[in-house]
Amino acid sequence: MEREGRAVRAVSGELVTIGEFARLSRLSAKALRRYDELGLLRPALVDPVNGYRYYDPAQAEEARLVAWLRRIGMPLSRIGRVVALDAGAAAVEIRAYWARVEAETAARRDLAMYLVDHLSAEGRTMTRISGGTGDAGTTGGTGGAGDPGAIGGTGSGAGAVPLAIRCAALTDTGTVRTTNQDAAFAGPRLLAVADGFGAGGAEASAAAIEALKPSVWGAREGALSAADLLNALEDTADSASRAVRDAVAPCAAPDGSGTTLTAMLWTGSRLGLVHIGDSRAYLLRGGELFRITQDHSLVQSMIDDGSLTEEEAASHPQRALLLRALVGGVGSAPVAVAVRPDVRLREVRAGDRYLLCSDGLSAVVDEAELRAAVIAADDPEAAVRRLVGLAREAGGPDNVACAVADVAVEG
């Protein structure tokens, strides 16, 4: 009966041919046939005899949405999910997709700037060698304003003063949760925090950090060039992604499990930063506290595009919604996706103090209090104890993980 009803509508003129619908929707007939084959936009009726496609004019808005999503580069598989959602959920999904595009573009921009600096330095080195003018030198940094430790060049020179890190880490269940899915680690080569979520969250956070420990540069100390270190960071980030997938596979709900990860790897002359999710890294330098990571979250993307203020973000109902994380599978969350963490190199100075923490600290303790606590602590051990104490004093609604490291002249 339903098929007969549609046939009657086609005969009566309520439905339009694919050619007419192409003009109405501003899509080509070829595109409409392709979208039909992929299940993105089914015709209202396909004639069983001649195979002609007929569309309801009311489908024009959905067709335009498909076309617009294609124009912003969204993959067809994801478009299929978006068009099946109600308007509000579709808006969230589109925002999440575009935030990921911008984050990946920023990562490519950082790499491009590194390559410009690195190749420019090689060119200057060759000029000096051929001209007999002495030392090769190093490149300058490409970090943005407000991030004094970001670099795009080759880092410390051969004659730099040897530095070392002194560090401590601490996790706490908090006052509300009954289990702890956060993990933290502090060692002579690695500083890391991870905030797990889902049924396998504890396994995911532990696996992500464990994957960083056998770092390929650990045995070679500071021998790696900046280019080799970036390659090693990329390999290690991939290892962390695989380790999380493997760790949560046996869990009851692997697709709903994953973790954030923020880590700093020390080679003896440089720091490599690995970051994904909404755990954070801060740098205390010259009495100022700088946040040196960008949250991969929905509210951060809304802050970035001006649709939300920092104050509004603190109470936003979707403040915990991640756009990027290390996850157990592609269906792990409505928007969180399994992608490689951001990696970059950082310039370090004696006297720097670094803080890494999960959102169990940063979400309940403001940056002014963080700064005061980090400055006042005599050493990293005292700092992590004070920071966990601040989170508990603020109600301790979530697990807390933090790690603090001081950069000092080796001796």
Image (spheres, helix red, strand yellow):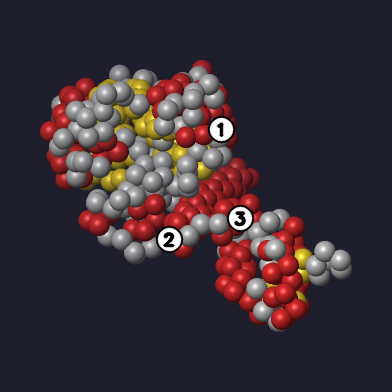
How far apart in space, not on screen, are marks 1 and 2 (Cα)? 34 Å
Mark 2 highlights which residue? 88
Mark 3 highlights which residue? 80
* 3 or 1: tag closer to the N-terminus: 3
SS for callout 2: helix
Amino acid marked by disc 2: Gly
Residue 341 lies, in percent from the top left, at 49, 39
Residue, x 72% and y 74% (percent of image)?
A: 8
How far apart in space, not on screen, are marks 2 and 3 (Cα)? 16 Å
Amino acid marked by disc 1: Asp
Residue 220 lies, in percent from the top left, at 52, 20
Residue, x 57% and y 48% (percent of image)?
A: 115
Residue, x 58% and y 68% (percent of image)?
A: 62
SS for callout 1: helix
Residue, x 39% and y 33% (percent of image)?
A: 197
Mark 1 highlights which residue? 238
Question: Is residue 192 in view?
Answer: yes
The quadrant of the rendering that contains the N terminus is bottom right
Q: Which is in the foreground here, disc 1 or disc 2?
A: 2
Q: Is residue 26 left or right of residue 141?
A: right
Residue 305 lies, in percent from the top left, at 38, 63
Q: Quadrant of residue 354?
A: top left
How far apart in space, not on screen, are marks 3 and 1 (Cα)? 28 Å
